[in-house]
Amino acid sequence: MVPLSPPGDAPAIGPGAPSDDAAVAALASRFFAATAASEVAALREGPRASVLVARRGADVVGYAIVQVVVDEAELHQIAVAPDRRRGGVGRALIREVLREAWARGAARVFLEVARDNEPAVALYESEGFVVDGVRPRYYASGADALLMSRPA
Ligand SMILES: CC(C)(COP(=O)(O)OP(=O)(O)OC[C@H]1O[C@@H](n2cnc3c(N)ncnc32)[C@H](O)[C@@H]1OP(=O)(O)O)[C@@H](O)C(=O)NCCC(=O)NCCS
């Protein structure tokens, strides 16, 4: 039986399991692009990407996908369920992404974020990411993309 943790406790972060694929795909489809559970499974089973899952009790409340190529890691996606935000889940996921990137041999972690995504930009800055460059009007919304990185 999965132990239930009260709200406010640190989330448990770990590698995604096959039984998490559908929940991760649902979150990814909601915040990024339509994603099938089979696509999450392919990433999880592949050699380069790690799918990290945040759990509170039995619930998947967030996830992150990081890919490492040689000594560079790229944070592809990170999302937390809206009703579980502002509780430290995003920060816990980022810290696990950094650990995972380092463990896989990355020297630096890169990401791309819309300049107007204030929660995400604030999270990344508070975890030591700095802006390396800007892609003007990169997103369909017209928002600029910030290219950010930090050592793994
Ligand atoms: C960005 C996201 C992952 C943050 O998750 P979260 O669990 O709410 O984050 P945390 O509770 O760990 O917050 C960590 C820090 O992020 C910043 N932050 C989070 N939400 C914020 C908000 N609404 N406004 C301003 N800063 C915010 C703060 O610095 C916060 O630290 P604090 O709580 O000490 O002030 C979440 O908002 C999300 O899923 N957004 C939609 C998907 C997305 O945009 N992903 C990023 C794509 S690049």
Image (tube, grey):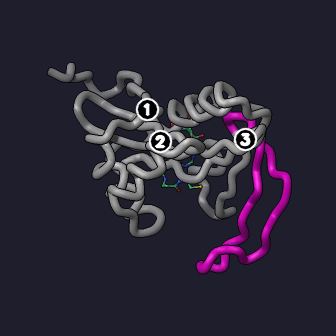
The secondary element bearing badge 2 is classed as strand
The numbered mark, 3 or 1, whose residue comes first in the sequence reads: 1
Q: Are marks 3 and 1 in contact (CB under 8 Å)?
A: no
Q: Position of residue 15 (x, y in %)?
A: 43, 32
Q: How far apart are the alpha carbons under marks 2 and 1?
A: 6 Å
Residue numbers of the magenta segment: 126-149
The secondary element bearing badge 3 is classed as strand
Q: Amino acid at mark 2?
A: Val
Answer with the quarter of the image where residue 31 lies.
Answer: bottom left
| Residue pictured at 14% horizontal, 21% vertical | 1
Q: Position of residue 143 (x, y in %)?
A: 67, 73
Along the line of sight, the residue nearer the viewer: 149 or 71? 71
Work out which residue is located at the far left of the displayed protein and give it. Answer: 1
- What quarter of the picture does the C terminus occupy? top right
In the picture of the structure, the residue carrying the numbered disc 1 is: 15
Q: Is residue 152 above or below residue 65?
A: above
The numbered mark, 2 or 1, whose residue comes first in the sequence reads: 1
Q: Amino acid at mark 3?
A: Val
Q: Residues within 10 Å of mark 1 (few under 14, many from 20)?
A: some
- Which of the two discs, 3 and 2, sits closer to the camera? 2
- Which of the two discs, 3 and 1, sits closer to the camera? 1
